[in-house]
Amino acid sequence: MEDVWIMDSSCSRHMIGHRKWFSSLNPVSTKEYITFGDNGQGKVLGVGSVSLSAKLSLREVAFVRNLGFNLDLRFILRRVRATFLMLRRPLFVPYCLLVRVNLTSVSGPTHYLKWHRRLGHLSFDLLVRLSSMGLIRELPQLRAEKDLVWHPCRHGKMAAASHTPVSRSVASVSGKWYVLVVVDDFSRFSWVFFMEFKDEAFGFVQDLVLRLRNESHKAMRAIRSDNGGEFKNSRFENFYRDLGLEQQFSSPYTPPQNGVVECKNCTLVEMARTMLDEHRTPRRFWAKAVNTACYIANRIFLRAFFGKTSYELWFGRQPSVKHLCFVLKKAGHLDKFESRCLDGIFLGYASSFRAFRVWILETKQVVETCEVSFDETMPCTTPAFELSGDDEEGTSIFEDEEGADDVGDAGATTPAAAPAPSATSSDDDGGPLPMASSSLPQQLAQAKAGPAEDAREVTSEIVPSRQVQRDHPPHRMIGDIHQCVTRSSVASLAFFFHSAYVATFEPRNVSHALTDSNWVNAMHEELENFERNHVWDLVEPPPNCRPICTKWVFKNKQGENGMVVRNKARLVAQGFCQKEGIDYEETFALIAHLEAIRILLVYAALKGFKLQQMDIKSAFLNGIIEEEVYVRQPPGFESAKFLDRVFKLRKAVYGLKQAPRAWYARLKSFLLKSGFVMGSVDKTLFLLSRGGDTLIVQIYIDDIIFGGSSHALVSSFAEQMSREFEMSLMRELQFFLGLQIKQGLEGTFVHQAKYTRDILKKFNMGDSKPMTTPMSTNTALDADEDGEAVDQKEFRGMIGSLLYLMATRPDIQFAVCLCTRYQASPKTSHRQAVKRIFRYLKFTPELGLWYSSGSSLSLRGFSDADHAGCWIGRKSTSGTCQLL
């Protein structure tokens, strides 16, 4: 616990028990002792200053012997703007904070920008997330800097921005005009080759394929490329046939069909463009920028499905980012008093061994050396680039070893998976949209004087930390809030890895989606689910067959806080084309009602157990259908050899009219075989009783809520479901159908704060003036036949949003139901009444339902009426309320 700070309200000063934290320490001249709560004492050995971050430091900190914790209260709490509550009992703080500080994260904007440039101008948010994951060796933990703007990123990554294009009209320093990009489909590991003529592609692909076949224990299956003439010729055909490889082509003028490599091409172009812009480098260095971009992209981009970088998937180990050494002349060519260093410009990485490519300013030549020292503090300038001699760019970045801890592993690395490459050649015209906003910087390298040393000896060891900094609100505390705090279980690390790289936009169509690697991965994941569940078979269409068209649906999955946590691509059938009696029979399927879910929450709170939730991945793909149904091949993923074939369905897919019924029948059959009893009233409720313990399962399509009085019974059910179905989520019930649920020892609180803020934003009421009541007692609503009509669609949308909010907000029920009477012909007065409800929600967004664990399980009912409240017809409005 030496790196944990405890906020102690009884602490008289800052105290530390470890010497490593002090940036300055002065011994004390007098004897001073600190008395602890158990009457023990610790001697004060000194007083000094401690730097927790670039913006947070402590002064007059006591260095106390035998102190196992770092104690502080007033200073840090003031910095986080904590609120104090002074009551008749002792002072306490409503939020208990456990602050965990890592010494490697003490950095300012300069250090922050240095790693931003080293990792290819990676976006600041993703840089901070990536630094906390522990997926890249030697990358320290970084803290975000607010209001930080880096202009090269703006210029290089904005569409139609002012930047230096990577143009097809400019040859590289070695006379290359084209770049060939090859991508492994499994790991997304990439190689780049530079060509003077397009017909050189065969030689590069041939060398790469033969080398990879020797390095990999698994054979290649296929190679996909575009329809360019450099790939579609007899040389490639004969070569692939001799090796037994399948040659696949995308359709003419359809780049999205080879979306993986097209996205990679766009990403490398964007990265190279940013690097060239930052230093105003001449355009003829575009090949070196692309070469460097490929090198770094393999190390920082994640395969979201696996939570690993491309480098780790290919080589089986995590990449490293330590690249610190120095450039100097060889000793045999030096005079005794001659300068031992040369100034140069960093251009990238060597292709055949571990070294850097540096352009020497004095000799006007490019050299490859491992003895360089980087000066990243000098401002970007425009050097006088004049080259002499040829520079090899016709090779790729083959990486046998990369500064691993064990030198004996050099050259002995075997790829972790068999490659299935895709290839394309590009003119690099800077036009395509990027796959991700990251790149490797072109850093200014200035040689430093010093003895010749190995890079490994001058690089400091920095171990990345996986510690998480966060506060602890009361609902995540177990036991008395005034006692020692124990944090409840958190989500698995895979959840955070998976959400580190996600797209925040939702594609308009499949062509748009194929330009972004995150959505391409999502589509591949969906098709892998089809194969894993044996959903269909590719067959010849039978006579008079009318296959149903398929369509991709893209949706960003959001968490409780509104952040995008997952990109979901769903392949659906266009069920509106189905014919009753031919493609389907019965379609009705049961789902749980919100009232039933609320009753289950009440029961769990009274019985003292917590509910869990699980989400079955691609649930409908588990439902078995009885009808004979044929669907067309997925758009963008058609088989090049069998374009005329269709898929015959074994199981249901989303969009089919009978899909919900088939899934419910599958799940119901499994639960009944497992010993469950279906509810007599609610057919989505299943009960299991064993030895006096009860397990309750509530089904809402593919979302399942469950809980019971026995922890062993709950765990057994979770394991049983995981063996039968693939799960995408299993945790304590927190967020369900828009309901935010907080379960504790004292009871359960259900609210819709996120949904409330969403509808306020949707109808432009986020900045409206708050009101303390949902409706006025002085204004009586009527038909208002002389009033001004308003948009009926907008009015009904507002009413519909409020109706769903009533699930946890009974305080607005009467006002909303009153306004629903005027949906047929809404007027200005009616819209003002609805807006008043929204203003009340702005004042009370956090209100909800509280189910106390100390209540009794009894049904109580209330009824009331307004007694001729309608001033036109003198009709009464009555209402009832039942409480369980």
Image (spheres, helix red, strand yellow):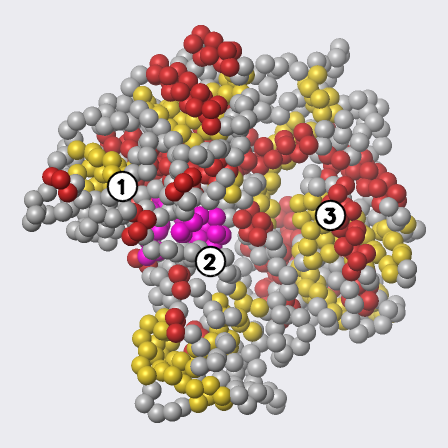
Furthest-top residue in this view:
234
Question: Which quadrant, please, contains the C terminus?
Answer: bottom right
Q: Quadrant of residue 731?
A: bottom right
Q: Is residue 31 visible?
A: yes
Q: Secondary structure at mark 2?
A: loop
Query: From the viewer's perspective, is residue 765 above or below residue 525?
Result: below
Magenta residue check for 179? no
Residue that carries the numbered disc 3 in the rendered image = 703
Apparent side of residue 732 relative to residue 720 in the rendered image (left or right):
left
Badge 2 crowding class, 10 Å Cα cut-off, few under 14, some 14 to 19, many 20 or more, is: some
Q: Where residue 744 sits: x, y (%)? A: 70, 68
Residue that carries the numbered disc 1 in the rendered image = 370
Residue at horizontal 18%, vertical 42%?
Answer: 344
Residue at horizontal 37%, vertical 55%?
Answer: 461
Q: Secondary structure at mark 1?
A: loop
The magenta-colored residue range is: 111-139
Q: Secondary structure at mark 3?
A: strand
Q: CA distance from mark 1 to mark 3?
A: 56 Å
Q: Quadrant of residue 850?
A: bottom right
Q: Is residue 154 visible?
A: no
Of mark 1 and mark 2, the one earlier in the sequence is: 1
Which amino acid type corresponds to the residue marked 1 in the rendered image? Cys
Furthest-right residue in this view:
680
Instruction: Compare residues 254 and 353 and report the one nearer the observer.
Output: 353
Furthest-front residue in this view:
408
Q: Where residue 177 sits: x, y (%)? A: 29, 22
Q: Where residue 49 sits: x, y (%)? A: 34, 76
Residue at horizontal 12%, vertical 35%?
Answer: 363
Query: From the viewer's perspective, is residue 415 above or below residue 448?
Result: above
Residue that carries the numbered disc 2 in the rendered image = 465
Q: CA distance from mark 3 to mark 2?
A: 35 Å
Residue at horizontal 66%, vertical 34%?
Answer: 529
